[in-house]
Image: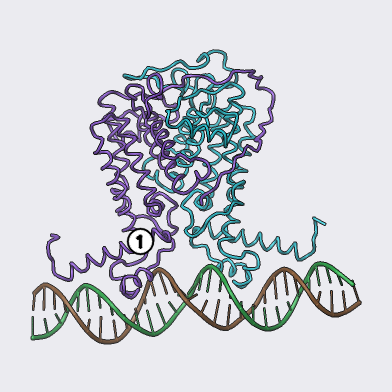
Chain colours: A cyan, B purple, C green, D brown
Amino acid sequence: MSTVRGARARARIEVTAAIKDEARRQLAVDGASKLSLRAVARELGMVSSALYRYFPSRDDLLTALIIDAYDSLGASAEEAHAKVSGDGPVRRWVAVCEAARVWALAHPHEYALIYGSPVPGYTAPDTTVPAASRVALLLIAIVREAHRGAGVALTPLPAELRPEARRMADDLALDLPPEVVTALVAAWAQLFGLIGFEVFGQFHRVVEDREAFFRHAAARLGHEVGLVFPGGADAGGTSTSGGGAAPVTTASDRDAPRRGAPQSRAPRRGAADRDARS
Amino acid sequence: MSTVRGARARARIEVTAAIKDEARRQLAVDGASKLSLRAVARELGMVSSALYRYFPSRDDLLTALIIDAYDSLGASAEEAHAKVSGDGPVRRWVAVCEAARVWALAHPHEYALIYGSPVPGYTAPDTTVPAASRVALLLIAIVREAHRGAGVALTPLPAELRPEARRMADDLALDLPPEVVTALVAAWAQLFGLIGFEVFGQFHRVVEDREAFFRHAAARLGHEVGLVFPGGADAGGTSTSGGGAAPVTTASDRDAPRRGAPQSRAPRRGAADRDARS
DNA sequence: CCAAAGCAAGAGCGGTGCTCTCTTTTCTGT
DNA sequence: ACAGAAAAGAGAGCACCGCTCTTGCTTTGG
């Protein structure tokens, strides 16, 4: 009953997919705000009114594209994560961040659709929530596992933020300390700040080697959420001292004890963290 | 030069301002993509074609609005900075960040215009650059002064990033070490990541006490660029040691399992419902 | 004072999202 | 197997959009 529900049902699925494909194609050319039902219909050889049999309005088509974009991004991130699932948390964290960046650069207009300015007069329905959460859930899972496994390094919260931090911890991941959850939410937003600036061209004439820059920034973000850098390499294997964990030099700031011996018994391929990729 | 150049010239200036005002008003209601020259003209009691005497196209009107928005944001930030110019670098840093956030929340559509998805088919002319740089220059100035004064804490860079970091340092602020410039650029993007997520509704049902959250995140950002926290106060005055600088305590070390085993990373539906833009 | 320049108005072009009606095709219950 | 229901396409039409071009009127500077 579920497989072939008749020629009509199958045709509907196909036409729906064709509409979304053509819409996505136009999206990549003209951007979301120029998405035109008539143009899509024209390209598909149908008449504009016929599209309304499939999507009751332009906004509904947009919603479908948004969900697809979230899912595409989420799938990319999950796939990248799965590829390094045996590695340490920092590496997994950076892998997910990089996957998000790569996806965004490959699909700038779809990225704009989901993380850019909201389309005015349009509010995304709750149907988008599960798809939208995938990357965040991945990040949470990485940090949670790091916490469960090797432990995470905590940064104390100011008093004024403590109740809110506890609330967020309750909402999002009950088994993580509020300090970590707070840092995680911030890192989540900051990650897409980095990606957005690159995709939207704000780094034009500012950052040239954007891949290296992003990798470093993502690693710093990972440190910020408390992931412990094994073996002492932030990202290069050549940095001094124990990891990006603590500032190292100049005047005033003397650093605090790191957890774990800096160089002792790299549990796994610590230092080569990212050199393997170049 | 701007003295009375005849009634006609003055009228032109006034009408131009009136058009921009009305356009801004519509922007705040309907958003950038719904900006309609005809509607502006209608509201102003003129005919649509007359507007083209003042702005040769819709995009040129948009450019004018963009520059105004950058300038408005920049002025807000500079004003906030001036108000705390006697304080330490962290305070000034956070003040500028908060000013940007407050401005963005007060002018969400103008914020979307300058930091949201770029309008497709529209590329901002170089005329926008000076206005767009004001906030960044302010952040640079704060860090530079902190560096000259109390010294900043450095975070070592990975080898692969060093050439690029040096290049950025040369471009942006010759008298700052590359490590700081790199962190500064990252913090700049991350700051607008935080603001953007809040303005665009990504924090809906995730962060409630957004002001406290932002203040903390901004302070962490300040630390990340090497600002030294005086007296150990993060934002409220309860943090230990030399500032939010270093992780202080570690989380559970309870049964750290051997990490060879592929643990299921059970995402476990943890009440994680967030809303994308609303 | 008068030609030149600036300006408003109107008509018009091709485009948009969307609705309504009418016809054709496919599915389904008896 | 067939009639009725449901789904789908076609086309006309509405009100809007950005933008262009032509036609007159007003201001201004030499």
Mark 1 belongs to chain: B
Q: Could you tell whether A243 is left or right of D10 in the image?
A: left
Query: Which residue position is annotated with label 1?
Result: B25
Query: Which one is nearer the viewer's eye here, C30 or A113?
Result: C30
Q: Within the image, what quadrant is residue A267 found in?
A: top right
Location of residue A60 in the rendering, given as x and y in whole percent from the top left corner: 59, 60
Indicate whether B249 appears above or below B56.
above
Across the whole image, how many numbered discs are drawn on residues? 1
Instruction: Give amino acid for label 1.
Output: Arg
Q: Residues within 10 Å of mark 1 (few under 14, many from 20)?
A: some
Mark 1 falls on what kind of element? helix
Location of residue C28 in the rendering, given as x and y in whole percent from the top left corner: 83, 67
Query: Which one is nearer the viewer's eye here, B73 or B116?
Result: B73
Q: Within the image, what quadrant is residue B243 found in?
A: top left
Location of residue A246 in the rendering, given as x and y in whole percent from the top left corner: 43, 21
Indicate whether A133 appears above or below C9.
above
Say which quadrant the N terminus of chain B sits in.
bottom left
Query: Which one is nearer the viewer's eye here, B5 or B203?
Result: B203
